[in-house]
C-alpha cells in the first residue's frame, strides 16, 4: 500500500501519524468495490435520460437552444465520470456490468472505451513523464482553451504503443463504426443539426471541462513524478459536486480503486499522511508570481519544452525576423520548460 514513516526502523510514531499497517486498515473500507446500487450507476442512467430528454425536447420545440445544449452537456459531463471509474473497475462490483457502463458511457461521449482505458492506465503508470504519459502532451502542448482537440492524441497513442488486449481492437472497431454510422445517418436523413447542437457541441464543452479538471489543474506545474506530489488536492465542497471529486485527484492517483464519491472522505481520513509527505493540497495558481505567470502563459500559448538546450521548438527561432525576437523566443523556452523530476519537491 503506502509507507507512512520516513524511517520505518523508528519505533516512535507521531501523535498525528499512524504506522503503515494502521493506514492500510484505515483506508481499506474505501478500497472495497462499491455496492451494486451506487452513485456512479445513477450518473450512468441519468446521463442517458438527460440525453434522451434533450433530443425529445429538440423535436418538441418547447425549450430554447441554450437549455437543450445545457441538458446535453450535463448528460455527457456525468458520463465522463462513469467512463473514468469504469476503466478502474470502480463503477460496479459486477465485472460485466462495469464493462457495459464503460462502453455505454464511451458511446455517448464519442470515445472508445478500450482506448480510454489503456491510455488512462498508461497515464497512471507514467504521471508527468513527457515521453510516456499521454495526458502530459494533452496538458502541455498548447493553450488550455484548446485542450479538447488534443484528446485525439489518445487514439494515436493507443495505436502507436499497440496497447490493446484480447478483443479490445475489435471493440474499438465496433464503437468507431457506430460513431461513423450515426454521422452518415445524420447526413442521409437530415438530422445533422441535432448531432452538431446536442452531441458535437456539448462534447467539445465537456472535452474542455475534462481537460482542465482531470488533466491540467490536478497535475500542474507538471514537475514532479513523485507519487505523493505528482497530482494535487484542492478541497472544496462546491467543486466536489461540480466536478465530481476530481479536486481530490491525488487521492485517486494513490488509490485508483476508490470510487469518485468517496474521494473526499478518503482524503479527510488520510490528510495527516498527505501532510507528512508534503503533498500539494491547494490549487496553486495565484500563490506566487511564478504560478500566476505560468497560468497566464498556459491560457495564451501553453506550449512547453522538455529540454532547455535541445528543445524541438528551438529551431523556430531561425525564422523569426530579428535577433531580439530570436533571443526572446529562446528565453521564453527556457523559462517555461517543464522537466519533471521523480524526486522533485
Image (cartoon, grey):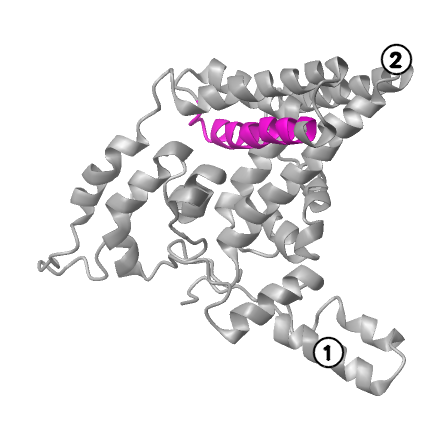
Residue 309 appears in the rendering? no
Image position of 99 with respect to 311: above or below:
above
Give the percent coordinates (x, y) of residue 296: 63, 66
Examine the structure image and report whether residue 342 is included in the region drawn in magenta: no
Image position of 267 with respect to 283: above or below:
above
Give the percent coordinates (x, y) of residue 316: 82, 71
**Residue at numbered disc 1:** 330
Give the percent coordinates (x, y) of residue 317: 82, 76
Specify the quadrant that holds the N terminus: top left
Q: In the visual, does 10 lie left or right of 164?
A: left
**Residue at numbered disc 2:** 189
Q: Judging from the image, what secondary structure is the residue with disc 1 in?
A: helix
Image position of 219 with respect to 300: above or below:
above
Residue 189 appears in the rendering? yes
Q: Dot 1: few (<14), some (14–19), or many (≥20) neighbours within 10 Å? A: some
Q: CA distance from mark 2 to mark 1?
A: 53 Å
Q: Residue at x 53, y 55 (%)?
A: 128
Q: Residue furthest left?
A: 11
Would you say the residues marked 2 and 1 are in contact, meaning their CB atoms lie under 8 Å apart? no
Q: Earlier in the sequence, mark 2 or mark 1?
A: 2
Q: Which residues are magenta?
A: 68-91
Amino acid at each position: 500500500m503506502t509507507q507512512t514513516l520516513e524511517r520505518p526502523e523508528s519505533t516512535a510514531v507521531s501523535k498525528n501519524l499512524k504506522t503503515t499497517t494502521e493506514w492500510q486498515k484505515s483506508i481499506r473500507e474505501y478500497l472495497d468495490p462499491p455496492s451494486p446500487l451506487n452513485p456512479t450507476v445513477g450518473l450512468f442512467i441519468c446521463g442517458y435520460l438527460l440525453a434522451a430528454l434533450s433530443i425529445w425536447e429538440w423535436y418538441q420545440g418547447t425549450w430554447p437552444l441554450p437549455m437543450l445544449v445545457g441538458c446535453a452537456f450535463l448528460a455527457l459531463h456525468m458520463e465522463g465520470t462513469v467512463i473514468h471509474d469504469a476503466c478502474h473497475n470502480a463503477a460496479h462490483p459486477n465485472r460485466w456490468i462495469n464493462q457495459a457502463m464503460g462502453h455505454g458511457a464511451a458511446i455517448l461521449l464519442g470515445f472508445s472505451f478500450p482506448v480510454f482505458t489503456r491510455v488512462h492506465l498508461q497515464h497512471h503508470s507514467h504521471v508527468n513523464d513527457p515521453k510516456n504519459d499521454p495526458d502530459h502532451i494533452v496538458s502541455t502542448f498548447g493553450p488550455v482553451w484548446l485542450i479538447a482537440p488534443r484528446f485525439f492524441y489518445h487514439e494515436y497513442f493507443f495505436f502507436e504503443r499497440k496497447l490493446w488486449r484480447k478483443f479490445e481492437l475489435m471493440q474499438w472497431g465496433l464503437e468507431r463504426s457506430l460513431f461513423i454510422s450515426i454521422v452518415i445517418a445524420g447526413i442521409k436523413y437530415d438530422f445533422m443539426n441535432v448531432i452538431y447542437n446536442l452531441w458535437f457541441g456539448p462534447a467539445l464543452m465537456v472535452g474542455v471541462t475534462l481537460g482542465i479538471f482531470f488533466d491540467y489543474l490536478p497535475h500542474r506545474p507538471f514537475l514532479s513524478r513523485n507519487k505523493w506530489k505528482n497530482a494535487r488536492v484542492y478541497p472544496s465542497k462546491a467543486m466536489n459536486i461540480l466536478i465530481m471529486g476530481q479536486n481530490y485527484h491525488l487521492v485517486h492517483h494513490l488509490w485508483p480503486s476508490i470510487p469518485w464519491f468517496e474521494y473526499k472522505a478518503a482524503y479527510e481520513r488520510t490528510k495527516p499522511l498527505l501532510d507528512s509527505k508534503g503533498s500539494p493540497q491547494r490549487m496553486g495558481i495565484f500563490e506566487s508570481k511564478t504560478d500566476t505567470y505560468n497560468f497566464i502563459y498556459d491560457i495564451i500559448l501553453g506550449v512547453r519544452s522538455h529540454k532547455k538546450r535541445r528543445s524541438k521548438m528551438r529551431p523556430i527561432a531561425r525564422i523569426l525576423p530579428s535577433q531580439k525576437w530570436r533571443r526572446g523566443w529562446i528565453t521564453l523556452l527556457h523559462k517555461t520548460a517543464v522537466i519533471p523530476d521523480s524526486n522533485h519537491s
